[in-house]
Amino acid sequence: MPHITLQGQRALVTGANSGIGKAVAIALAEAGAKVVVNYVSSEQRANKVVETIKKNGGDAIAIHADVSKEEQVQQMFKQMIDAWGSIDILVANAGVQRDADFIDMTLQQWQFVMDVNLTGQFLCCREAAREFVRRGVDPKLSCSAGKIICMSSVHEVIPWAGHVNYATSKGGVNMMMQSIAQEMAGKKIRVNSISPGAISTPINTSAWNTPEAESELLKLIPYQRVGKPQDIARAAVWLASDDSDYVTGTSMFVDGGMTLYPGFREGG
Ligand code: NAI
Ligand code: BGC
């Protein structure tokens, strides 16, 4: 994407020491943004992402915070703003699965997934929006006052047996994203989601890491390949840039056609 530039902009990516978040952080930096690499565990992996970005000529810092904890999220934003003055781009990416059959699902499994996937995004979106409103548009950087990208999932629309907590959290992310977008558009803040299909990362290793599992998974993907974190990273760079300036309140499905009901290719 050589023509896209995020030069001078400051981005925060949650859960950026693994999988999709890591690819997004690296791609935003390649497009010129300074990036906060948020992590909750493995500082070492976060530092490696920072190193990669710096080796590529970019700028990054690693900041620890559990996105489900209000004080830690506020402290992370404070640290970022103290270091770089403000924030222009938030990618609320951190997410977890705690899978269980519905009748066996514990309240703890339900609550943990809600706390990270939904409350965690709420807390980060709110802190980012507060700073965007405080600062307003800086036309030297972007024609909007700030951009928020929520990492949702195809499971914001595809029901998912055995994953009721996760699918519910992503359905919630969709409505939260649209409601924030509606409320904040007048302040020139854009809010969108990316809804990935199956992307090979540590969250779903067992779904793609054997030939048998991969061939089962491909039955759900018309485009006939499992997604890569970079597929999502490219979409994130575009949504963060002024090239998507008229796009707000949208969920962009990056899923190789998973939401096209491939079971209906025959029959129906
Ligand atoms: P991953 O497991 O590699 O990454 C998740 C990241 O979130 C890790 O860095 C983890 O440490 C971090 N995290 C978890 N709890 C946290 C907390 N309380 N505070 C801060 N960070 C926390 O998995 P992946 O696939 O990269 O997931 C990233 C996002 O993409 C998640 O929101 C997931 O739901 C979403 N997603 C993933 C898909 C896939 O097929 N891999 C498909 C659709 C959505
Ligand atoms: C889940 C993955 C899954 C993908 C497609 C994502 O939201 O985190 O585990 O492979 O959706 O079903």
Image (cartoon, rainbow, N blue to C red):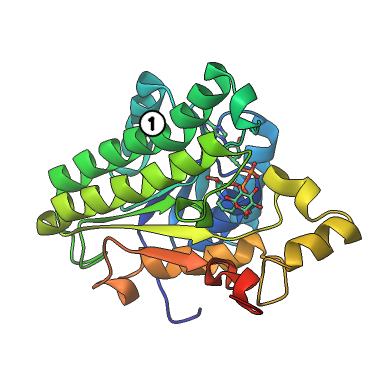
Q: Residue at x 65, y 57 (%)?
A: 55
Q: Nearer the viewer, residue 235 or 250?
A: 250
Q: Nearer the viewer, residue 118 or 79?
A: 118
Q: Nearer the viewer, residue 97 or 202?
A: 97
Question: Residue 157's spot in the image, x, y percent?
Answer: 45, 55
How packed mark 1 is, by other alpha carbons closer than 10 Å (few <14, some 14-19, many 20 or more), is many
Residue beneath disc 1: 119
Q: Residue at x 65, y 76 (%)?
A: 222
- Image vertical order of residue 49 relative to residue 75, above or below: below
Q: Nearer the viewer, residue 249 or 80?
A: 249
Which residue ends up furthest to the front in the rendered image?
A: 268
Regarding mark 1 in the picture, which secondary structure is present there? helix
Please name the amino acid that badge 1 sits on: Thr
Q: Residue at x 52, y 18 (%)?
A: 107
**Quadrant location, the C terminus:** bottom right
Residue 13 seen in the current view: no
Question: Residue 254's spot in the image, x, y percent?
Answer: 53, 67
- Image vertical order of residue 201 relative to residue 238, above or below: above
